[in-house]
Amino acid sequence: MPITLQDREILRLAVPAFGALVAEPLFLLADYAIVGHGLGTTALGALGVAGTILATVVNLCVFLAYGTTASVARQTGAGHHARAMRSGMDGIWLALAIGAALIAVCWPLAPPIVGLFGAVPEQAGQATTYLRISLLGAPGMLVVLAGTGVLRGLQDTVTPLTVAVGSFALNAGLNAWFVLGLHWGIAGSAWGTVLAQTLGAAVYLVVVARGALRLGISLTPHLAGVKQAGTAGFALLIRTLCLRVVLIAATVVATRMGQAQLAAYAIATQVWTLLAFALDAIAIAGQAITGRTLGAGDVAATRAATRRMVQWGLWSGFVLGVLVVAARPLLPGLFDADPQVTEQLLAVLWPVALFQPVCGVVFVLDGVLIGAGDQRYLAWAALWTTLAYLPCAFLASEFGIVALWCALGVWMIARLITLGQRALGTAWLVTGA
């Protein structure tokens, strides 16, 4: 594809977003590598269970990033810069409130939540330890989401990249020190991530607060705005809940297959997540560009950018699929996997690679519709595709881990159909602030 001016705008937003998004799953990949080398298969499986729970809790709040990006970008496109920053501040206050609530609710419920996954007692104990410590970083994690959304809406993806890289480096260093140096076990891995995420959140608070003060925006919470931010994010919460139900169901099925299958699934999930976040970089550009162009009333530019980003998503997915196949022989050694885990992991990486082009297009269309504020349709589409997936997942439990990943691929194809049909229509092309 020849590089056009439109491509340069997409790349200006997507390339830094790629680095920032990849850094997030690298937090857990670093945890998995250090825990795998230092603590063994049981701890690796426990981290898989606790990591899935924690990712579910935090990612249910991804609307703090996505909704904030869309609202700030739309106001920016319409020239309402003070309103854009005010909505960003409201999102950050909402993040702090939700983070505090998560600690209060999930801390006492950690053991029964872990128990839902059917892990053996030793795994369950370690998973509970990791989960409880990690919950202390929930406010910081959510502030990172909201602050990232503010800056993306302002068409700035470079600052989130800088914060993400710094946080990842700190996380990896702390985890290695706590687990391998101080021998704190799985608790050390959790503490390293908590400290890194909290310091990253502090950076976002400083950056956004300075921007608000320059525009004369008060830093105190605006209760009506915080409530509006929560209401606007409800449909995105439903969408994200459906996505997490899919991954939770897959984790439950993998857990009941055995420890080797669970460990292989946990590693493959982190690889898939890393690829997903890489592809989502174009979707982040889609959110920012769609919100800005629709805010400015330019439907033609929105359509043109969408077509181009779909092309980028397709080709990026193809390249990542090829890279997975090339790296496949090396991945088990990275996690010090035993022979049983290695056998399962090598098999499951084939469907992971195969479905990457489909993922590339799906993520782009998802980002475009989020940027357009089409959250209600996204919620309904997510609900129906999830209901179609669940029987396939539990049927796959009779045929092994590869069948489970093929069921996930069928779910992605269903999402491609629902999102593609919507993007071809006009109902989502709502202009103005």
Image (cartoon, rainbow, N blue to C red):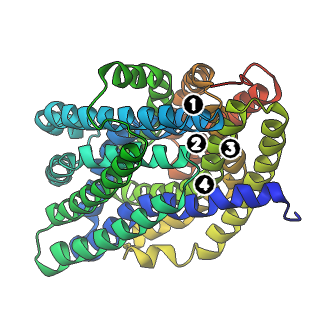
Q: Do the residues labelled 1 and 3 touch (CB within 8 Å)?
A: no
- Badge 1 crowding class, 10 Å Cα cut-off, few under 14, some 14 to 19, many 20 or more, is some
Question: Mark 2 or 1 closer to N-term?
Answer: 1
- Badge 4 crowding class, 10 Å Cα cut-off, few under 14, some 14 to 19, many 20 or more, is many
Cα distance between the residues tagged 3 and 4 = 12 Å
Q: Do the residues labelled 2 and 1 touch (CB within 8 Å)?
A: yes
The foreground one among 16 and 293 is 293
Where is residue 229, by image quadrant? top left
- Badge 2 crowding class, 10 Å Cα cut-off, few under 14, some 14 to 19, many 20 or more, is many
The amino acid beneath tag 4 is Ala
Q: Mark 1 points at which residue?
A: 389
The amino acid beneath tag 2 is Leu
Q: Which residue is drawn at 80% across and 54% down?
A: 6
Closer to the camera: disc 2 or disc 3? 3
Q: Mark 4 points at which residue?
A: 281
Closer to the camera: disc 1 or disc 4? 4
Q: Which residue is drawn at 44% across and 29% down?
A: 241
Check disc 3 and report its element: helix, strand or loop.
helix
- Badge 3 crowding class, 10 Å Cα cut-off, few under 14, some 14 to 19, many 20 or more, is many
Question: Mark 1 or 4 closer to N-term?
Answer: 4
Q: Picture coordinates of residue 362 (x, y %)? A: 68, 42
Question: Mark 4 or 2 closer to N-term?
Answer: 4
Q: Picture coordinates of residue 256 (x, y %)? A: 35, 43
Is residue 357 placed above or below 81 in the rendered structure? below
Q: Which residue is drawn at 36% across and 45% down?
A: 213
Q: Which quarter of the figure is the N terminus placed in?
A: bottom right
Q: Mark 3 points at which residue?
A: 289
Cα distance between the residues tagged 2 and 3 = 29 Å
Closer to the camera: disc 4 or disc 2? 4
